[in-house]
Image (cartoon, grey):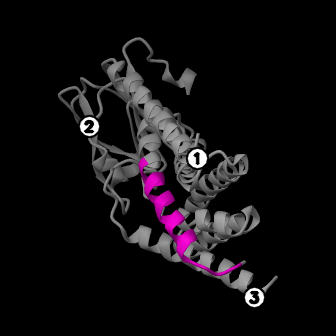
């Protein structure tokens, strides 16, 4: 077997791993119950996905919107705005991360409202 | 150290820095932290094949340090150092096995770099978001790694400085 053939096998293996991870996370995703907001790993707020509204997070660095059972960041004061571009989340385990502000928004599921125990 | 070897090392380090800078000017096109092309890895893979693992390590670590000091901060330095060190170790070991070509080495380097960065982010932010980003990072690291590996292979072939 040539090096090139081994390369192809390794690349296919990586693509398969990526596909498997996609399937596990996205097809197996359950509807979430609410979101938990953390700064530096410390929980600062928790909202149910039925609590529609706009919330200022972390002293106004990020704005969280909850509507129609989905949550997203509508505004951020950081330069890259990656958290705004990450879009809407609704399924158990989905997250939005704002690295400059050390802030994360993670959906928790209907049965595991004790997400803190895991993370 | 011979002048030709020193020149090649200096060339690789400056190439890595220029590529890092170019990459920082490309707007993010995928809204996922950690997804990027990893242009600077061209210089690291080049050094790994044209010289040896020690020189590749110098290229990678000097780049991370200088770019961190020039354009970043302590946090961004921690992210890129985690990615760079992990990726270096995996690429060096994989090259040592002599089973794969530049492309697979670069693919593994890219994937591990992405995962290392996000792993460090998880440690610093105290969350487990790595789980959720992993599929995107493996996919983007693989595709970017193929491109980077091909470019590095061409450079190794075309640049004929003996070191």
Q: Residue at x 62, y 52 (%)?
A: B87
Distance Cα–Cα, label 3 vs label 2: 56 Å
Work out whether residue A44 or residue B135 is closer to the camera in this orientation and state it: B135
Distance Cα–Cα, label 2 vs label 1: 43 Å
Q: What is the residue that sits farthest to the front in this orientation?
A: A1
Q: Residue at x 61, y 75 (%)?
A: B12
Residue B35 badge = none
Residue A29 position within the rendered picture, expressed as x and y whole percent measured from the top left:
35, 20
Q: Residue at x 44, y 31 (%)?
A: A16
Label 2's element?
loop
Q: Is there any visible trace of residue B109 in the rendered image?
A: yes
Work out whether residue B78 or residue A12 is closer to the camera in this orientation and state it: A12
Q: Dot 1 corresponds to which residue? A: A3
Determine the chain carrying the residue at label 3.
Answer: B
Residue B104 position within the rendered picture, expressed as x and y whole percent measured from the top left:
55, 48
Contact between marks 3 and 2 (CB within 8 A): the answer is no
Q: What is the residue that sits farthest to the bottom in this orientation?
A: B3
Q: Residues within 10 Å of mark 3 (few under 14, many from 20)?
A: few
Residue B3 badge = 3
Q: Dot 2 corresponds to which residue? A: A88
Work out whether residue B96 or residue A111 is closer to the camera in this orientation and state it: B96
Relative to A35, is B21 on the left or the right? right
Work out whether residue B100 or residue A76 is closer to the camera in this orientation and state it: B100
Residue extent of the magenta highlight: B143-162
Per the picture, the main secondary structure of the magenta-coloured stretch is: helix
């Amino acid at each position: 077997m040539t090096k090139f053939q081994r390369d192809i096998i390794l690349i296919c293996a990586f693509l398969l791993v990526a596909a498997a991870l996609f399937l596990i996370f996205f097809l197996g995703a359950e509807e979430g119950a609410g979101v938990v907001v953390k700064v530096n790993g410390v929980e600062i707020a928790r909202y149910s996905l039925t609590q529609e509204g706009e919330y200022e997070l972390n002293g106004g660095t990020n704005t969280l919107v909850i509507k129609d059972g989905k949550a997203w960041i509508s505004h951020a004061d950081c330069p890259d705005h990656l958290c705004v571009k990450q879009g809407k989340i609704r399924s158990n385990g989905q997250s939005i991360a704002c690295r400059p502000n050390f802030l994360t928004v993670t959906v928790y599921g209907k049965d595991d409202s004790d997400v803190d125990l895991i993370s | 150290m011979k002048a030709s070897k020193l020149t090649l090392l200096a060339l690789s380090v400056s190439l890595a820095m220029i590529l890092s800078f170019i990459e920082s000017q490309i707007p993010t096109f995928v809204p996922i932290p950690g997804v990027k092309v990893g242009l600077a890895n061209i210089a690291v893979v080049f050094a790994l094949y044209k010289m040896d693992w020690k020189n590749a390590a110098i290229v990678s670590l000097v780049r991370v340090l200088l770019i961190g000091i020039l354009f970043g901060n302590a946090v961004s330095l921690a992210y890129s150092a985690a990615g760079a060190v992990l990726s270096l170790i995996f690429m060096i070991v994989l090259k040592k096995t002599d089973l794969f070509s530049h492309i697979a080495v670069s693919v593994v380097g890219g994937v591990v770099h992405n995962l290392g960065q996000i792993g460090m982010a998880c440690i610093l932010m105290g969350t487990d978001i790595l789980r959720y980003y992993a599929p995107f990072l493996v996919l983007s690291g693989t595709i970017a790694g193929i491109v980077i590996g091909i470019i590095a292979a061409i450079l190794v072939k075309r640049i004929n400085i003996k070191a």
